[in-house]
Image (cartoon, helix red, strand yellow):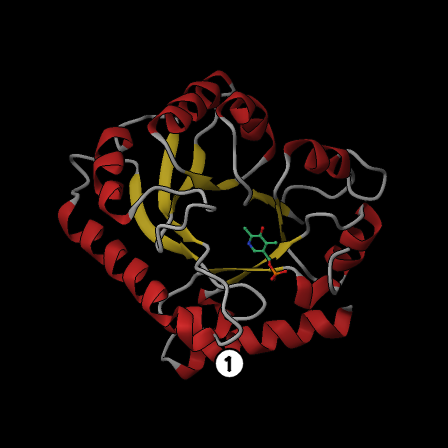
Amino acid sequence: MKQRIEDIKNKISKAAIACGRNADSVQLVTASKTVSADKIQEAALAGVKIFGENYIQEARQKMESDELANFSFSQISWHFIGHLQTNKAKYAVKMFDLIHSVDSFKLANELNKHAQNNFKVQNILIQVNIAKEATKSGIYEEEVEALIRKIGHFKNISVKGLMIIPPFYNDPDKARPYFKAVCDLRNHINETITTEIAPNVSMDELSMGMSGDFETAIEYGATLVRIGTSVFGKRD
Ligand SMILES: *Cc1c(COP(=O)(O)O)cnc(C)c1O
């Protein structure tokens, strides 16, 4: 596993440098759904800093496990990358440094409320359903600006950028238009939404790219690539 992680980190750095970016401008988020706590521990000891989980209960069991409970927050960080139900917002706020998948005003509002109760500013990304797929969560491209205007003044959430899961293709080139679209959308929001309207918004992060297409995503500005299979092998 150590070797696989080194390989992926090298590929990430190379892809960044190839398009004129800094090698350290892209972070690896290791997608660890269905992966056991001991495997995650092995990855953490091999240098993985960020783990992305999809389900609250599964994530909690791993975080509290003997294998992982003793890692400090400076050693590893947990991100939520799955679909988040509003009634789970109160748990998510206690567990995750970044929630990638905020896709409604109601959820953002709930996160803000619970973050306030926990004396925390919760970092979030807005998930965009970039190809308008019926099976995927996320809001449509056209709705992003309005949502950010509505939540941008919330004191206990901080919008850090956008997340997408483009349609799955065997050829990563086919995902290019979606990576480009979300990059353009981010730039547009940066130009139109001022810090006066939305003091807690800084659109620096783009969470996109998985095992099959992260190098292409990096060309379009990905700062967080979510990679599971290439680190842990195929999921059961
Ligand atoms: C599982 C998952 C990934 C990782 O996918 P791989 O193809 O295994 O690299 C990335 N993002 C999300 C939201 C996931 O659920």
Above or below for 176 versus 150: below
Above or below for 38 versus 156: below
Is residue 109 or residue 116 the one in the foreground? 109
Residue 213 position, x and y percent, is 50, 70
Q: Left or right? Give the position of 111 relative to 210.
A: left
Residue sitting farthest toward the top: 117
Q: How many marks?
A: 1
Residue sitting farthest toward the bottom: 18
Q: Left or right? Give the position of 77 relative to 183.
A: right
The residue sitting at 57% across, 37% down in the picture is 96
Figure quadrant of the C terminus: bottom right
- Alpha-carbon neighbours of circle 1 within 10 Å: few (<14), some, or many (≥20)? some
The image quarter containing residue 3 is bottom right
The image quarter containing residue 199 is top left
Is residue 51 or residue 86 the one in the foreground? 86
The residue sitting at 68% across, 73% down in the picture is 6
Residue 212 position, x and y percent, is 56, 70
Residue at numbered disc 1: 14
Figure quadrant of the N terminus: bottom right
The residue sitting at 63% across, 54% down in the picture is 31
Ligand 1 placement by image quarter: bottom right
Residue 57 position, x and y percent, is 69, 31
Q: Left or right? Give the position of 146 relative to 209.
A: left
Specify whether tag 1 is near ligand 1 (CB below 8 Å).
no
Residue 95 position, x and y percent, is 61, 32
The residue sitting at 39% across, 31% down in the picture is 157
Going by the numbered disc 1, the residue's amino acid type is Lys
- Could you say whether the residue bearing mark 1 is in a helix, strand or loop? helix
Above or below for 115 versus 149: above
Above or below for 171 versus 38: below
